[in-house]
Image: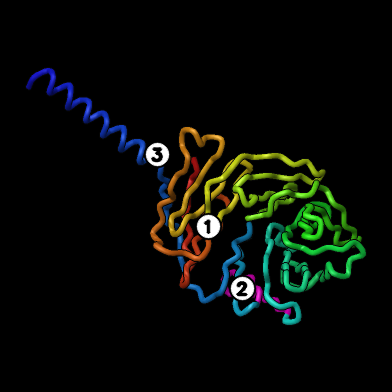
């Protein structure tokens, strides 16, 4: 074999090896942990105590083994949003009636708030649990983020008016995150400080993991992205068995996939 031929073969081998390595580096292997059949309309997620939350026929449910707790409020219409960050104070949002219900850990009603009756006009488009007996609120009337103290029934605006509409939002106790309609990512803390976190990939649905990381899907393909490393690794595809899915939920390295018939739990380790 000539030196030239050996050199060409070496280059081809190196290129193939690099291609294989690069391809593998762009994927995240999801390890199947468990799966079970369900007959529900919507899957909300799991809490730290192992309880699962779902909605069936507009009845909100909390289930673990043979334990089943249920809550239903026919007068407020359909449940629009559920926040289970604090399992002792669960938030149910009924957008059609501009109202929220807070439930305890056995799904007993603690508080019901009709924001239309508030002295300061509020039309809620987004909501989530915050700290110190407060709820995050996005008020559609002034396009501002605020905090509502549900014990004192007091509302205060914390942000300036947003100039772009909200495409997606997510909250934790200290932060209100949102993606605007131009796919720009922002955060607002409880003191009203707004930070630009960068831009996100185009998506159908998404879930924020941290101020730099998120999971998103385009069609039936699921991806993970760390915007701090986007130059070297734009997005990692998460390899799951399901060809179609309705929803996904991520908590403590467990990715739950909700399909029409089952919930499948995977363990994933993000880069």
Residue 221 in the image, given as x and y percentages of width and height: 43, 55
Q: Depth check: give the residue in front, 93 or 255.
A: 93
Q: CA distance from mark 2 to mark 1?
A: 22 Å
The quadrant where residue 86 appears: bottom right
Q: Depth check: give the residue in front, 5 or 21.
A: 5
| Image-based side of 239 in relation to 167, left or right | left
- Magenta residues, as a range? 59-73
- Report the number of discs: 3
| Image-based side of 206 in relation to 171, left or right | left
Nearest to viewer (mark 2 / mark 1): 1
Q: Which residue is mark 2?
A: 55
Q: Is residue 254 visible?
A: no
Which residue is painted at 84% across and 58% down in the image? 148
Q: Is residue 39 visible?
A: yes
Q: Which residue is mark 3?
A: 25
Q: Answer with mark 2 or mark 1, whichever residue precedes in sequence.
A: 2
Residue 219 in the image, given as x and y percentages of width and height: 45, 59
**Is 164 covered by the magenta stretch?**
no
Q: Answer with mark 3 or mark 1, whichever residue precedes in sequence.
A: 3
Local SS, label 3 = helix
Q: Which mark is residue 204?
A: 1
Q: Is residue 42 above or below residue 83?
A: below
């Amino acid at each position: 074999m000539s030196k030239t031929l050996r050199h060409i073969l070496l280059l081809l081998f190196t290129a193939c090896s690099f291609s294989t390595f690069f391809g593998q580096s762009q994927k995240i292997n999801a390890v199947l942990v468990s799966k079970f059949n369900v007959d529900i309309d919507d899957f909300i997620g799991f809490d730290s105590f192992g309880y699962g939350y779902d909605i069936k026929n507009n009845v909100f449910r909390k289930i673990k083994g043979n334990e089943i707790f249920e809550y239903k409020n026919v007068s407020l219409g359909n449940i629009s949003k559920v926040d289970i960050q604090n399992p002792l104070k669960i938030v149910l949002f009924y957008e059609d009636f501009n109202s929220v219900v807070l439930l305890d850990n056995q799904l007993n009603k603690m508080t019901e708030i009709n924001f239309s009756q508030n002295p300061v006009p509020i039309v809620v488009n987004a909501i989530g649990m915050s700290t110190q007996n407060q709820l995050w609120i996005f008020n559609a009337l002034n396009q501002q983020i605020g905090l509502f103290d549900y014990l004192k029934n007091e509302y205060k605006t914390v942000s300036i008016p947003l100039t772009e509409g909200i495409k997606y939002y997510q909250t934790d106790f200290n932060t209100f995150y949102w993606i605007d309609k131009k796919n720009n990512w922002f955060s607002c803390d409880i003191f009203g400080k707004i930070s630009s976190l960068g831009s996100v990939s185009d998506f159908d649905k998404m879930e924020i993991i941290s101020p730099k990381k998120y999971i998103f899907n385009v069609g039936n393909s699921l991806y993970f992205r760390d915007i701090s490393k986007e130059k070297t690794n734009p997005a990692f595809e998460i390899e799951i068995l399901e060809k179609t899915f309705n929803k996904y939920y991520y908590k403590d390295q467990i990715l739950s996939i909700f399909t029409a018939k089952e919930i499948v739990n995977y363990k994933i380790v993000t880069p």
